[in-house]
Amino acid sequence: MGFDIAELGRSLSYGRLFTILKHSPRESAFVRSLAGDAALWSQTDHMLAAVVDQLAVVSWQLQGDKRAARPQPLPRPGAVRPKLGPERLRERFIEILRRREAANG
């Protein structure tokens, strides 16, 4: 692109800078600084990952093995998955509540 930020207000107008930033591609450092790694995936990428996840679940359901583990969804950029399952999270939550009750008497 080739512009010097030191020229802002002189040969580089604020309007031109706004236009450059507004139309920056997803992969640009500016957009990634605002949206993080989630900026790397487009809406189409997220929708395709959802389709893959659903196909994995359907395949898992149709295989007939009751003991087979449920398939994990594809990791999405910027999404943080809990390391504990729902039952373990519930147990941890109850444990924390009991400690607080004990501490408060």
Image: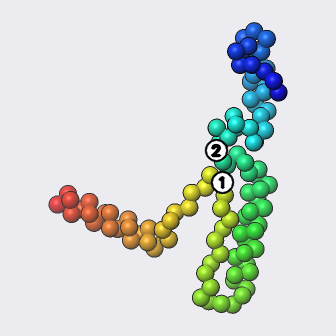
Disc sitting over residue 11 in the figure: none
User: Looking at the image, is mark 2 or mark 1 earlier in the sequence?
Assistant: 2
Q: Position of residue 93 (x, y in %)?
A: 38, 65
Residue shown at 72% from the left, 87% from the top: 63
Q: Is residue 25 above or below residue 9?
A: below
Separation (CA) of disc 2 from disc 1: 8 Å
To which quarter of the image does residue 31 belong? Answer: top right
Are the residues at dot 2 and dot 1 in contact (C-beta closer than 8 Å)? Answer: yes
User: Which of these two is toward me, 28 or 16?
Assistant: 28
What coloring was used for the rendering?
A: rainbow
State the residue position of label 1: 77
**Which amino acid type is shown beneath numbered disc 2?**
Gly
Q: In the picture, which quadrant includes the N terminus?
A: top right
State the residue position of label 2: 36
Q: Secondary structure at mark 1?
A: loop
Q: Is residue 20 above or below residue 39?
A: above
